[in-house]
Image (tube, coloured by chain):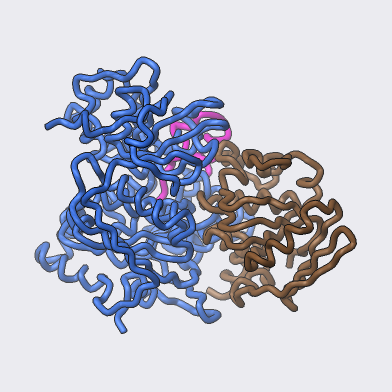
């Protein structure tokens, strides 16, 4: 199983699409590792630098509604994976992106808007970290001398995929 | 309680329900293209499982960048080509026979009502126009589909969209789906199937129905679905005539896939389209829609007619009827990409290609190409394209470029004037 948790990258906008996460011009790469330099290259947000230190250090993304909409490209979860980001926390996800995350043994956690707002209150603390307890289904955010914990839901099937290391391993044993 | 079409397809294809709500379905068709399949192939090889569940149920095409533009895309094409040969995938479409997957595969007769279909491509929802459940998936789902012939879904609820009235002159399926997306929003149908019903759909050709279902994903929908009827049977007849005594028999059998009258829906929308106007997107999300009247005068640098949304013969016919005897505005580049070789050839025979070329259009081979900014019409920073495609995301057709989505008719009005314009004034009487 992958490990989850660490420094956070906050992306404060709804409807961030997979073209912004990894532009189509890089879909000609045929290994996941080759995608690494192009993470979030076309995402334009105030104060966001795709090549900046916050992006490089991040292990968790916190964002808003309908994250990962658009193209089905699994290159989007892959570009996160090869950059060390294995968990995305959002108000909601587009279906294909969410499934791709779990299929890769990564996590896509949905939380209500008020909890997402609470997480965003840590956005300006440079030391913000989130730890995820998948078994206890709790996440803890720390930053700026504060700490809070929140429960989260994860569908049993999605959890089974994470524990199995992804859908290929799960399906290969079972079907 | 009756069932929706999607519920009937799920019930008839259910292999396993490992946890409540997680349904593993048997797949009738697994479609592959050269962008999302090679990494699945490489992983299967690395696992020592380089095989396919059933080569007759796998359909493969090189369509996103073709003919290959550089060494990397040539390598992707070669990986898919070599694999198709190695695995005995006979329905593989290479340079010369290839076209945009969601236009080519229906044209080849690969889809039937009641089918389950996946592809590593978000616009796979197109094939629901035949009364099928068709969903875009990522490479891992595709890989398991190739190996095991199954795919897992949270069973989607169905949103019923009743399209009432009759479409006014100059208004087409593209305008209808832009309107629907504008009403639902870009995540209004997440984990939902969009079922298109009503007299407007009944009157549509299969081409128009595919334009509708193609963009279900732009509202977040898992699949678009239309009820299979006489129009569906007429389209499929060359491929099914040996299986049915008559067209009436086929219509009757396909009727069993219709949603029951007492089926339960997540939501029902009633839209009267009798006053609908030609529409166009204005921002970077497909639910940002205005009328062409409101947007009239917005300058464009390029007009692109093609894609899995609007690159079919019907689209070219409407466009050519408006363009005949006219030319491109001097500030505009026009690019036509017929979606399949058959569309291209039929357009040639009908003299449509002459009309486009005499007007100043560049005609490319069938390819996804510029729609996602990969080849044959990529925009420069700051450029604007009026496109019959399906996504207007920032930079979609090229970094720093902007896309306005519209119908083929509206694209021709933009081509003639060099700016967004009302198509109705150029329609022949």
Which residue is more in the foreground, A97 or A8? Answer: A8
Left or right position of B32 against B329:
right
Is B73 within the magenta?
yes
Is residue B88 in view from this perspective?
A: no
Magenta-tinted stretch:
B59-79
Which residue is the extreme one toward the top?
Answer: B330
Rendered location of residue B304, percent (x, y) = 38, 31
Rendered location of residue A98, percent (x, y) = 58, 61
Is residue B267 in view from this perspective?
A: yes
- Which tint is chain A? brown
Residue drawn at (42%, 38%), measured in percent from left and top? B368
Residue drawn at (48%, 38%), measured in percent from left and top? B372
- In the image, which lettered chain appears blue? B
Specify the quadrant of the image occupied by residue B199: bottom left
Is A128 within the magenta?
no
Query: Compared with residue B328, is residue B14 higher up or lower down, i.e. above or below?
Result: below
Q: Quadrant of the N terminus of chain B?
A: bottom left
């Amino acid at each position: 199983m992958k490990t989850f948790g660490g420094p956070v990258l906050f992306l404060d906008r709804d409807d961030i699409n997979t073209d912004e996460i990894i532009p189509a011009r890089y879909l000609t790469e045929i290994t996941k590792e080759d995608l690494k330099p192009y993470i979030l290259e076309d995402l334009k947000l105030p104060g966001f630098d795709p090549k900046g230190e916050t992006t490089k250090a991040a292990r968790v993304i916190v964002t808003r509604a309908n994250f990962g909409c658009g193209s089905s490209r699994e290159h989007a979860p892959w570009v996160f994976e090869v950059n060390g980001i294995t968990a995305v926390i959002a108000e909601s996800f587009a279906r294909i992106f969410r499934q791709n995350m779990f299929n890769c043994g990564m996590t896509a956690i949905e939380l209500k808007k008020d909890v997402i707002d609470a997480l965003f209150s840590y956005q300006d603390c440079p030391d913000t970290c989130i730890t995820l307890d998948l078994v206890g289904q709790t996440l803890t955010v720390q930053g700026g001398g504060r700490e809070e914990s929140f429960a989260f839901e994860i569908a049993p099937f999605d959890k089974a995929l994470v524990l199995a290391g992804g859908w290929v391993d799960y399906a290969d044993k079972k079907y | 309680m009756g069932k929706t079409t999607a519920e009937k397809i799920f019930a008839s294809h259910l292999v396993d329900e490992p946890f409540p709500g997680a349904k593993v379905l048997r797949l009738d068709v697994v479609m592959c293209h050269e962008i999302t399949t090679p990494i699945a192939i490489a992983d299967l090889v690395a696992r020592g499982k380089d095989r396919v569940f059933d080569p007759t149920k796998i359909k493969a095409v090189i369509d996103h960048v073709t003919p290959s533009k550089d060494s990397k895309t040539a390598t992707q094409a070669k990986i898919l080509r070599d694999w198709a040969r190695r695995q005995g995938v006979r329905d593989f479409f290479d340079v010369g026979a290839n076209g945009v997957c969601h236009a080519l595969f229906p044209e080849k007769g690969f889809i039937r009502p009641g089918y389950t279909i996946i592809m590593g491509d978000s616009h796979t929802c197109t094939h629901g126009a035949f009364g099928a459940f068709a969903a875009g998936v990522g490479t891992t789902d595709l890989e398991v589909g190739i190996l095991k012939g199954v795919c897992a879904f949270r069973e989607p609820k169905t949103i019923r969209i009743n399209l009432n009235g009759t479409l006014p002159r100059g208004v087409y399926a593209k305008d209808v789906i832009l309107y629907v997306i504008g009403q639902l929003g870009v995540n209004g149908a997440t984990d939902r199937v969009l079922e298109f019903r009503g007299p407007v759909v009944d009157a549509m050709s299969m081409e128009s129905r595919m334009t509708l279902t193609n963009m279900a994903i732009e509202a977040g929908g898992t699949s678009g679905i239309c009820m299979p009827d006489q129009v569906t049977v007429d389209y499929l007849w060359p491929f099914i005539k040996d299986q049915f005594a008559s067209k009436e028999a086929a219509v009757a059998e396909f009727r069993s896939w219709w949603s029951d009258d007492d089926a339960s829906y997540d939501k029902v929308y009633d839209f009267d389209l009798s006053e609908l106007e030609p529409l166009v997107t204005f921002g970077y999300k497909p639910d940002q829609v205005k009328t062409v009247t409101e947007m009239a005068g917005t300058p464009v640098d390029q007009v692109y007619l093609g894609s899995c949304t609007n690159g079919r013969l019907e689209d070219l016919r409407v466009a050519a009827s408006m363009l005949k005897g006219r030319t491109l505005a001097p500030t505009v580049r026009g690019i036509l990409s017929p979606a399949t070789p058959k569309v291209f050839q039929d357009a040639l025979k009908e003299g449509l290609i002459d009309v486009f070329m005499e007007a100043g259009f560049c005609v490319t081979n069938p390819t996804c190409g510029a729609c996602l900014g990969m080849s044959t019409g990529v925009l420069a920073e700051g450029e604007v394209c009026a496109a019959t495609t399906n996504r207007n995301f920032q930079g979609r057709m090229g970094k720093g470029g902007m896309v306005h989505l519209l119908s083929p008719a509206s694209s021709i009005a933009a081509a003639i004037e060099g700016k967004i314009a009302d198509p109705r004034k150029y329609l022949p009487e």
